[in-house]
Amino acid sequence: MKDNELKRWRMILGKNEGFREGVGSGNGKGIGDDTNNCEGQGEGPGEGPGEGDGQDFGTELTEDEQIIDQALESIYNNRDQKGDLSKSHPRVAKWLGEIRNYFPKSMVQIIQKDAIKKMNLLQLLGEPEMLENIVPDVNLAATLLMMSESIPEKNRDAARAIVKKVADELSKKLYVPMYKAISGAINKSVKKRNSNFKDIDWTTTILKNLKNYQPDYKTIIPEIKYGYAHKRRELNEVIICIDESASMFTSVVYSGIYGSVLSTITSIKTRLIAFDTKIVDLTSKLSDPVEVLFGLQLGGGTDINKALSYCQKLVESPNKTYIVIITDLEEGGNVENMKQRFSDIKKSGVEIIVLLSLNDDGAPNYNHNNAKFLSDIGIPCFACTPDIFPNLMAAAFNKEDIMQFWRNK
């Protein structure tokens, strides 16, 4: 049997099905199971089925074939896999994204439906008490978003409710630190009297008004409120550009939520762009985080140069524009063109920042050669956790050295 045919059978049967090679009678070869006496069709002088000692099947899989094999193995050959929406499914979400690179859309939909069935997600989505007990989880949201096209109509409302719960929880958690960090680009070196409530410097205000302490009420009545003066800046524009490839799936969820939060700050004009090998402009959906998340298509290829080209066309005032691109820098297109595009944007005066990840998952996998190139030409390039992101944007707006900011963190 030819090598490519053997590989096909190996992929079909899986690595645990004992696909072995034996030696047939009459010096022939045969394909059999992993018993000591495997049988197969003989070749050579011998006649009929051969008998011989089973030996390991030696065909090696390429890197791409290993990815496919791992994805299929996780869905079709995982006998211990049980559905549980109270836990995350990061590995499943990652593999479901990867299969988009290797199978046509019709086949991807079949595999996704099988994954839903294997994980018992449909049964869990139909249980009313599940929504009450679910713990908001980024990996869970990513898994449901990955499978959104394959979830039957009758279960989609439940899936959407889960994603909404995750989005609401993250928005509530992320809004206050983001707003405090960057709203108004506050200059803390300048004091102002009778400031607006959100700009009050409470320490100075209390000290200056101690003389107005009212014993009967056990409180201070501030005659004068001291606060911070705002820097007078023209409108800043932030373009968040998200890599939708499978390896970025939790970062995609955080990026979508942060894009929605930034859009609520009136001193900033926010755009949200998602890309794989195609470009999707989600700016019009920013008012609704759930719509943003369902507008994303996790998984697929990567064309960073194409995405940068689109963002470059959106720039109106380079010195007031900030492009934050969240990507692992694994360019699927022309790498040299991508590098040149980064360089051109940097030279134009745009502040461009590359986040290798935006999540709490630990050290990301990324293209080290491309990251080094960007660092060498002065483009900040590092992984970022969600809690640091607000202060990162504040540092950018205040024209601080971003790499120095990161080293201090």
Image: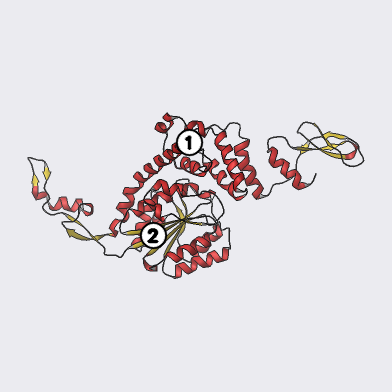
Specify the amino acid type for callout 2: Val
Q: How is the image coloured?
A: secondary structure
Q: Position of residue 138 (x, y in %)?
A: 45, 42
Query: From this viewpoint, is residue 215 visible?
Result: yes
Rendering quarter of residue 41:
top right
**Quadrant of the snapshot with the N terminus:** top right
Using residue 210 as the reference point, say whether residue 73 is left or right of it: right
Label 2: which secondary element: strand
Specify the amino acid type for callout 1: Asn
Q: Position of residue 316 (x, y in %)?
A: 39, 67
Q: Nearer the viewer, residue 178 or 84?
A: 84
Q: Position of residue 122 (x, y in %)?
A: 51, 33
Q: Which residue is mark 2?
A: 238
Picture mark count: 2
How many angstroms separate mark 2 from mark 1 (CA)?
Answer: 36 Å
Q: Nearer the viewer, residue 407 or 130?
A: 130
Answer above or below: position of 282 versus 29. below
Q: Which residue is mark 1?
A: 155
Query: From this viewpoint, is residue 375 visible?
Result: no
